[in-house]
């Protein structure tokens, strides 16, 4: 994948893509995460693959100044389920920010462990 591609396919138990999240790469919060202004957030709209309709959104928010200064590895995520009614699809949406955080934003140099490689 492209280093700047924040598109994710969410597949069901049959390995069929049922939802697609697209964070793009042109958001200030991806390029320059800071605790204020447009640099403080990233949005990942989630679309139903059959209808193309936006059905949910995951938001990544950089914490406030004090928390960001003392614990820069802390991130806040918010999920708006919108039109995701299927419980199994909701679980996929809940798992998405965990995956995104570990895959792209987890740079915890404070814990002293080598991490997953």
Image: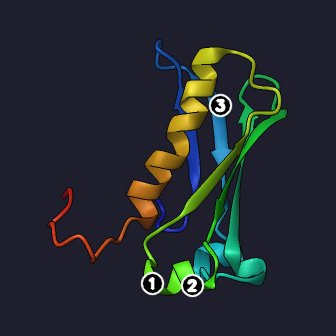
Task: Work out whether mark 1 precedes mark 3 in sequence or the reverse, and give the earlier one.
Answer: 3
Of residues 93 and 62, the one nearer the viewer is 62
Left or right of 112? Residue 61 is: right
Q: Residue at x 17, y 72 (%)?
A: 112
Q: Nearer the viewer, mark 1 or mark 3?
A: 1
Of residues 99 and 9, the one nearer the viewer is 99
- CA–CA distance in space, label 1 to label 2: 6 Å
Classify mark 2: helix, strand or loop.
helix
Task: Work out whether mark 2 precedes mark 3 in sequence or the reverse, and give the earlier one.
Answer: 3
Q: Position of residue 113 (x, y in %)?
A: 15, 66
Classify mark 3: helix, strand or loop.
strand
Classify mark 1: helix, strand or loop.
helix
Up/down of 79 relative to 89, above or below? below
Up/down of 12 relative to 6, above or below? above
Task: Return the residue at label 2.
Answer: 66
Residue 92 quadrant: top right
Residue 105 quadrant: bottom left
Is disc 2 surrounded by few (<14), some (14 to 19) or many (20+) residues within 10 Å?
A: few
Up/down of 69 relative to 20, above or below? below
- CA–CA distance in space, label 2 to label 3: 36 Å
Q: Position of residue 109 (x, y in %)?
A: 27, 77
Q: Residue at x 32, y 71 (%)?
A: 108
Check residue 19 in the rendering and tell me which mark sits there, or answer none.
Answer: 3
Q: Position of residue 50 (x, y in %)?
A: 75, 22
Is disc 1 surrounded by few (<14), some (14 to 19) or many (20+) residues within 10 Å?
A: few
- CA–CA distance in space, label 1 to label 3: 36 Å
Is disc 3 surrounded by few (<14), some (14 to 19) or many (20+) residues within 10 Å?
A: many
Is there a contact, CB below 8 Å, between mark 1 and mark 2?
yes
Q: Nearer the viewer, mark 2 or mark 3?
A: 2
Task: Return the residue at label 1.
Answer: 70
């Amino acid at each position: 994948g492209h280093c700047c591609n924040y598109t994710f396919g969410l597949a069901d138990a049959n390995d069929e893509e049922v939802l697609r999240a697209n964070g793009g790469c042109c958001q200030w919060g991806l390029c320059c995460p800071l605790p204020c202004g447009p640099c403080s957030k990233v949005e990942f709209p989630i679309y139903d693959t059959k209808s193309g309709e936006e059905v949910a959104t995951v938001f990544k928010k950089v914490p406030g100044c004090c928390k960001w200064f003392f614990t820069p590895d802390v991130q806040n995520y918010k999920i708006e389920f919108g039109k995701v009614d299927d419980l199994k699809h909701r679980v996929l949406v809940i798992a998405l920010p965990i995956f995104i955080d570990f895959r792209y934003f987890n740079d915890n140099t404070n814990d002293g462990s080598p991490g997953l490689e």
